[in-house]
Amino acid sequence: MTATARRPDAPGRRDRSSRKRGESRLLNAAVGLVLLGAAIGVQSLDLTHNEYTAPLTYVGEQGEDVDTTRLVVRLNSVTAAKSIQHLTKTIKTDQVFLVVDVSAKSKRKPYKLGPATLLTADGRRFSATDRVDDSATVTAEYAQPEIWTRGPYFFEVPPSVLPGSRVVIGLPPSVLVEPYEPEAEIDLALDEAAARKLTDSAEAVYSTAGK
């Protein structure tokens, strides 16, 4: 039986093998990171436009400070009126004007409040009326850090939509699409009886002078 002697390793053979194994592990790790990034990218592409631009809603009640991380918003009062007088103009309606008085302050830098929306119990949305000039609304002022500003929003709506309604207030529209932009949704505390009482006692003329 002939014994075969093992050939000695060539100088440096083990070092080259170790380096190759190390380089292989680094390459595999890099490939794994690339694949993980691609998977995350593909997952983000699955979001619809509505999901990507959906706001982050902070819910509260009348009289409560609703902190949206950028703005703190408080609903002070809700008034009904048959007409609105601003400067020399009186605006009448066949429905009802809902005057939503709010206060707001910012957390870090000045912000203006965006247009408000009235959200009804059955999911319908009413924008604040454009028949009353913006200069009469809270959107004309900047909410400063830790300094409250106050003013109204005006809605022109059928009285039937008031029970269970909420006001939604966010930031002004921006050219840049930002995901999860914050907004405040505040319950007006109007059940059937309260809504009927509010409309039955609607002011003949609500004047913006001095408010």
Image (cartoon, helix red, strand yellow):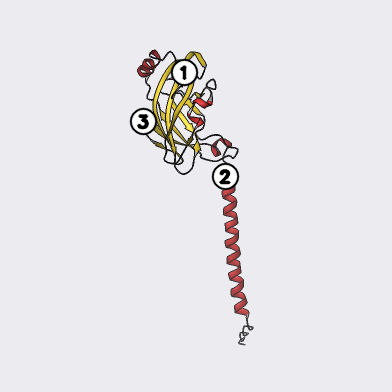
Dot 2 surroundings within 10 Å: few (below 14), some, or many (20 or more)? few
- Is 30 on the left or on the right of 211, as rendered? right
Q: Quadrant of the N terminus?
A: bottom right
Residue annotated with mark 2: 44
Residue 45, by quadrant, is top right
The amino acid type, in three-letter code, at marker 1 is Phe
Residue 67, above or below 19: above
- In this rendering, the count of numbered labels is 3
Secondary element type, mark 1: strand
Question: Do the numbered discs 2 and 3 sit on residues whose CB atoms are within 8 Å?
Answer: no
Q: Which of marks 2 and 1 is nearer the N terminus?
A: 2
Gap between marks 2 and 1 measured at Cα: 43 Å
Taking the image as shown, residue 58 lies to the left or right of residue 127, namely left
Q: How far apart are marks 2 and 3 (CA)?
A: 39 Å
Look at mark 1 in the image and give the residue it sits on: 97
- Residue 10: image quadrant is bottom right
Vertical side of 55 occupied by 187: above or below: above
The numbered mark, 1 or 3, whose residue comes first in the sequence reads: 3
Relative to residue 75, is residue 30 drawn left or right?
right
Q: Earlier in the sequence, mark 2 or mark 3?
A: 2
Residue type at the position of mark 2: Ser
Q: Is residue 38 left or right of residue 149?
A: right
Q: Residue at x 37, y 21 (%)?
A: 191
Q: Mark 3 points at which residue?
A: 63
Count neighbours of disc 3 (C-alpha within 10 A) and say few if under 14, some if 14 to 19, many if 20 or more: some
Residue 88 rendering spot, x and y as whole percentages? 52, 17
Q: Where is residue 71 in the image (x, y as percent from the top left)?
A: 45, 38
**Amino acid type of the residue that numbered disc 3 sits on in the rendered structure:** Gly
